[in-house]
Image: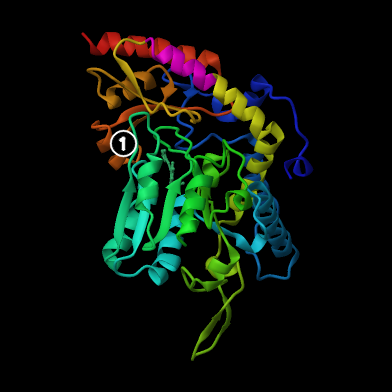
Amino acid sequence: MNAALTIPRTLDITAIRQEFPILNREVKGRPLIYLDNAATTQKPQQVIDALVSYYSNYNANIHRGIHTLAEEATASFEQTRDIVQAFIGAPSREEIIFTKGTTESINLVAYCWGRNNISSGDEIIISNMEHHSNFVPWQLLCQEKNAVLKIIPIDDNGELVMEEYEKMLTTRTKLVSIVHVSNALGTVNPVRKIISLAHAVGAVVVVDGAQSAVHLDIDVQEMDCDFFAFSAHKIYGPTGVGVLYGKKALLEAMPPFQSGGEMIKDVSIEKTSFNDLPYKFEAGTPNIADVIAFRSAIRFVLECGKEKIRRHEEELLDYAHQELEKIPGLKIIGKAKEKVSVVSFIIEGAHPQDIGILLDNRGIAVRTGHHCAQPLMDRFCIPGTARVSLAVYNTKYEIDELVKGLHKVVKILSK
Ligand code: 7TS
């Protein structure tokens, strides 16, 4: 489907970098080296232009006006739904719900599906490497419903222990919610296998695609997940926009998430009937500008070509692994066979936060801390890591600068 949406181009990293205005800025007197892409990616000019164009030319509320601006805004907003549908291979546009991010998408499932389908003694399975947004909603649901939360363990390389997962599945398993790519380790989980095993016991599966949607080809039909959640801001798009894909039959059976305008068909003093999908789950004025600009972000990714981006990032990842391992006292956390774009590490005798501050002094942005995955940090008996996460615009030169910076960090902190 991708080819029909865009014209592919060669991956010229120098030219691509020029499309990201922020990459021209300096931090602490040095050119910015941005290696915190798992937190959020930077935005290309076409995304920024789409935002400005909406507010400059056709700002209007959608789905409710017959005037020209409202029609233009509605058409543009709905075009993003079509492109998202194609981007993840969803069977229909009604299954694409706009939210404000992965967190809200997962919470929507926990509230609307979870509270209607989970009861006392039921079991929910997640893993030890979940981001808190795919951990806490299920923990709270289990507490509320007196259900059981089971955690798939991970091994020392940061891979799921699949035999343990298989043993956990029972007829009481109602839901499995699993991260596709770990934000803290980069591990790519075998979601197809996880899903087919879960379906064999009749469980519904949620896939947290916050980190995978930008790096991997997503085909929700092939994957056969029941729900898939992701955020625009991690795919070169704006903040405040996310997507929940859900299988139509499940979405239709679920009650609304929030209520008010947009989500209704008819309201009388006695009762309210709800709007059709997807609007049943999109109460109130949505984030129109950012949804529209999200389309430009997807276009950017498709123009570059996911496969080409992946090859570039893999090359950088291998190089980063190889060079970082030469640094005395540095240990990489997360060495799964299948991993993308993330290197988490600790350095003996150095607090991750100090590593982050010293790198920032050299204009290098990395994330430090528990990465909203405290149960994972507990598993490795560490308070946190420093994390480098890569995107299409990163270069070998930047890895070299990072390595130089880390050698300095080791020198300073070992004094
Ligand atoms: N799931 C995963 C796997 C994530 O990496 C994140 C955000 C979320 C869910 C939540 O996404 P949001 O857009 O709703 O916030 N991860 C990170 C990170 O690694 N650093 O900052 C945010």
Quarter holding the C terminus is top left
Is residue 394 visible in the rendered image? The answer is no
Q: In this rendering, would 145 be left or right of 47?
A: left
Where residue 398 appears, x then y in whole percent? Answer: 50, 16
- Residue visible at 47% across and 26% down in the picture: 35
Q: Which color scheme did the rendering employ for the protein? A: rainbow
Tell me which amino acid carries mark 1. Answer: His
Q: In this rendering, would 394 be left or right of 406?
A: right
Q: Which residues are magenta?
A: 316-326
- Residue visible at 66% across and 68% down in the picture: 63
Prevalent SS, magenta region: helix
Where residue 7 appears, x then y in whole percent? Answer: 78, 36
Q: Nearer the viewer, residue 188 or 396?
A: 188
Q: Judge whether 408 appears above or below 48 on screen.
A: above
Is residue 154 visible in the rendered image? The answer is yes
Where residue 338 appears, x then y in whole percent? Answer: 49, 31
Q: Nearer the viewer, residue 360 or 341?
A: 341
Label 1 secondary element: loop
Quarter holding the N terminus is top right
What residue sits right under mark 1 in the picture?
370
